[in-house]
Image (cartoon, helix red, strand yellow):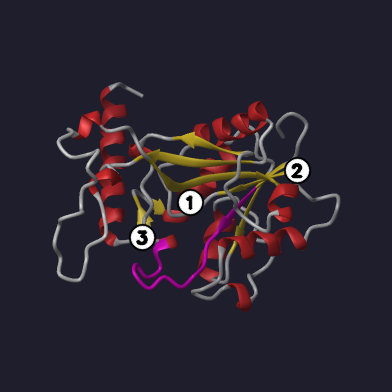
Amino acid sequence: MINGKKVCAIIPSRGGSKRLPGKNVLPLHGKPLIAWTIEAGLNSQYIDRVVVSTDCEDIAKVAIDFGADVPFMRPSEIATDTASTDSVILHFLSTLSVANYPDIVVILQPTSPLRTEQDIDQALSLLIQKEAEGIVSVCECEHSPFWSNILPADLNMGTFIKNDIKGKRSQDLPPCYRLNGAVYVFTSNSFVNMQGISYTDSVFSFIMPGSRSIDIDHELDFRLAEVILDNNENRNLSKGI
């Protein structure tokens, strides 16, 4: 609990992944990918319950083995390629009794294994501090979007860079941020009223470092996460931790 409010973390984890098959249970640095997120949720000082919503028996077994609740298998109508995270969370909330209904819901995607319990707790603290309806994690863009644009059919670059940007160095451009998919925190009432994740004046950003913002979608993302975890382990060993 935080500030007297019940907190439930929900990890949406569908079985079908076309770009990286079976990614949510692939071994990453000694344990299944989803286990990193389950453990971060369980280690949070504020989260009361960690739930995995899945349509896959293999994922359900791993989730239970690592201490998460799997109260039911996800219905087929919200287990398709086109099913949204919003529909999964709304479905879960609709199954709860009044006694088990959380005041705050934390959405943790299993594809963000480097996000820590400290990140989660800081986002929850920010929700309370701001008296917000929601908190969404972001990180600074690796490459400035000011250097990006669409291209015309003939590929000419006549209007590719805006005039007020021409001649500026990258370090002179204002920092820009992107969604990193690691942590979404919303009051349950606002999530239901807005029918999902929303971006309003009552929703605030929680800035995370890029080093913990990897969102695993492709094999290259997976390998990069392994390298970072290896480096972290070697650094800790050298410090005697």
Q: From mark 3 to mark 2, how far is it between C-alphas?
A: 31 Å
Magenta-drawn stretch contains 15: yes
In the rendered image, residue 34, in percent from the top left (x then y), is placed at: 47, 55
- Image coordinates for residue 144, horizontal then vertical, percent: 27, 42
- Tell me: 188 left or right of 228: right
Q: Name the image quarter holding the C terminus.
A: top left
Q: Is residue 71 visible?
A: no
Please name whichever residue, 231 or 17, is drawn nearer the observer in this view of the structure.
17
Give the x, y percent position of residue 137.
49, 41
The residue at which mark 2 appears reads as 103
Where does the magenta region start and end?
9-23
Asked where in the image residue 6 lies, by quadrant, the reply is top right
In the image: residue 164, left or right of residue 167:
right
Q: Amino acid at mark 2?
A: Asp
The amino acid type, in three-letter code, at marker 1 is Ala
x and y, in percent, of residue 16 in the image: 46, 73
Q: Which residue is mark 3?
A: 217
Answer with left or right where residue 34 lies relative to residue 160: right
Quarter location, residue 44: top right
Q: Residue at x 63, y 34 (%)?
A: 127
In-image side of 20 versus 60 (left or right): left
81 or 229: nearer the viewer: 81
User: Camera-side residue: 11 or 38?
Assistant: 11
**Mark-to-mark CA distance, 1 and 2:** 25 Å
Q: Secondary structure at mark 2?
A: loop
* Marks 3 and 2, the one that precedes in the sequence: 2
